Amino acid sequence: MQMMRKKTRQVQVGGVMIGGEAPISVQSMNTTDTADIAATLTQIKELAEAGCELTRLAVPDATAASALGEICRQSILPIIADIHFDYRLALAAIKNGVNGLRINPGNLRDPEGLTQISAAARKRRIPIRVGVNSGSLNRRMIEYYGGITAEAMAHSALAAVRQLEETGFEDICLSVKASDPSLTISSYRLLSELTDYPLHLGVTEAGTAWEGTIRSAVGIGTLLAEGIGDTIRVSLTADPCEEVKAGYAILRALNLRQRGAVLISCPTCGRTQVDMLKLAKEVETRLIKINAPLTVAVMGCIVNGPGEARAADIGLAGGQGEFVLFKKGEIICKLDEDIAVETLFSEIEKMEQESGERAQ
Ligand code: SF4
């Protein structure tokens, strides 16, 4: 069932639309040193292959800001510069061709600096995300609202919005990320009631790939299920491609985006006749690069396995040292265990080509 999305204004970051009727985009943040141009471009390529649509780069100093010029020239993804403390880094990033900015109102409050950023961004027609973070919330807001509360988070973002609006700038996206998913949810709910600017969802400092994915799925997923949110970033202490993978899994779980394959794998039991853990892990890893919206099943026995494998677009059901390969409900062949995954992926790639989804 498709939920009703809250109607928001639209901004454009490079070629990606955020808000309005645009699909909910999946973004990430490079973990590379921005000053290392080659490493940053390599990771951008990896992110793009994983399905990332926008990436953010840290701009901690002038060296990083100047590296943005070459990165933006060569990047295959739109680049958002992440700016803290120093408005001059934002100006340098804009001059060097970034497609969007993220500023933190908790540490970038100088009205004159904000006016200069807004003028430069307007001239280049790039949007600004006001990114409030529970870890760096404005002290005055914390005192006024009696702690790090949803009100303090939402009103901190709105105060920065007013400052930008006073300079005539409205090309704005907002985020109010907390490390606590409950606070994240209540902050975004409040913000969504108070504004129609598009919202970038995320649970900040969510944790490792396992814990962080769960915390993000709860925080981001709850909001998306209520129709709130226009773009998402899953924050993980992991390879950023894992963030992209988790982001699409959340969207797929809510039927909001169909990009990429869904893996159905049996939980294993006493009937399991193949090394399911190894098999599921290998298939899951290789599916990251598949863009087509396919359902892929890998099952461990001949009891429930054939049923699930038959119902999926393509699937393997395990027997003793061999698998049966199903495609669109039909048995294609029996395969020895050692060639099962290769054969499965050569069929998946054919299906992807047929569905025309390979082009990104
Ligand atoms: Fe057990 Fe077979 Fe079900 Fe897997 S598919 S959990 S092996 S009964």
Image (spheres, grey):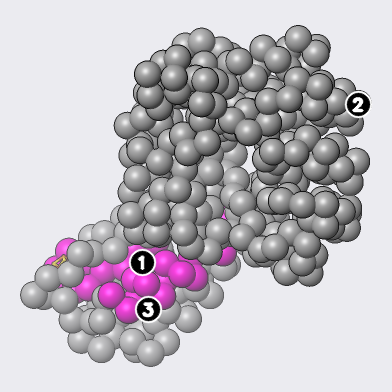
- Quarter of the image with the N terminus is top left
| Above or below, 353 relative to 222 | below
Q: Amino acid at mark 1?
A: Gly
Which disc, if any, is residue 315? 1
User: Where on the picture, by quarter, is residue 93?
Assistant: top right
Q: Residue at x 83, y 38 (%)?
A: 88
Give the numbered dot on residue 333. Answer: 3
Mark 2, other Cα within 10 Å: few <14 / some 14–19 / many ≥20: few
Q: Earlier in the sequence, mark 1 or mark 2?
A: 2
Question: The residue under label 3 is which amino acid type?
Answer: Cys
Q: Residue at x 52, y 16 (%)?
A: 155
Q: Nearer the viewer, residue 14 or 347?
A: 14
What numbered label is drawn on residue 123? 2
Residue 91 % position (x, y): 85, 37
**Image point (26%, 76%), residue name:** 276
Task: Give the spatial CA distance, label 1 vs label 3.
Answer: 11 Å
Q: Determine whether, in the image, residue 347 is placed left or right of residue 93.
A: left
23 magenta-colored: no
Q: Nearer the viewer, mark 1 or mark 3?
A: 1
Around disc 1, counting alpha carbons within 10 Å, would you say few (fewer than 14), some (14 to 19), or many (20 or more)? Answer: many
Task: Mark 2 or mark 3: name the one nearer the start of the chain.
Answer: 2
In the drawing, does residue 36 fall left or right of residue 323? right
Q: Depth check: give the residue in front, 175 or 349.
A: 175
Q: Reading the chain from its start, which is encountered first: label 1 or label 3?
A: 1
Point out the stretch of residues depicted in magenta: 277-306
Query: Circle 1 — which element?
Result: strand
Q: In the figure, 11 relative to 214: above or below?
A: above
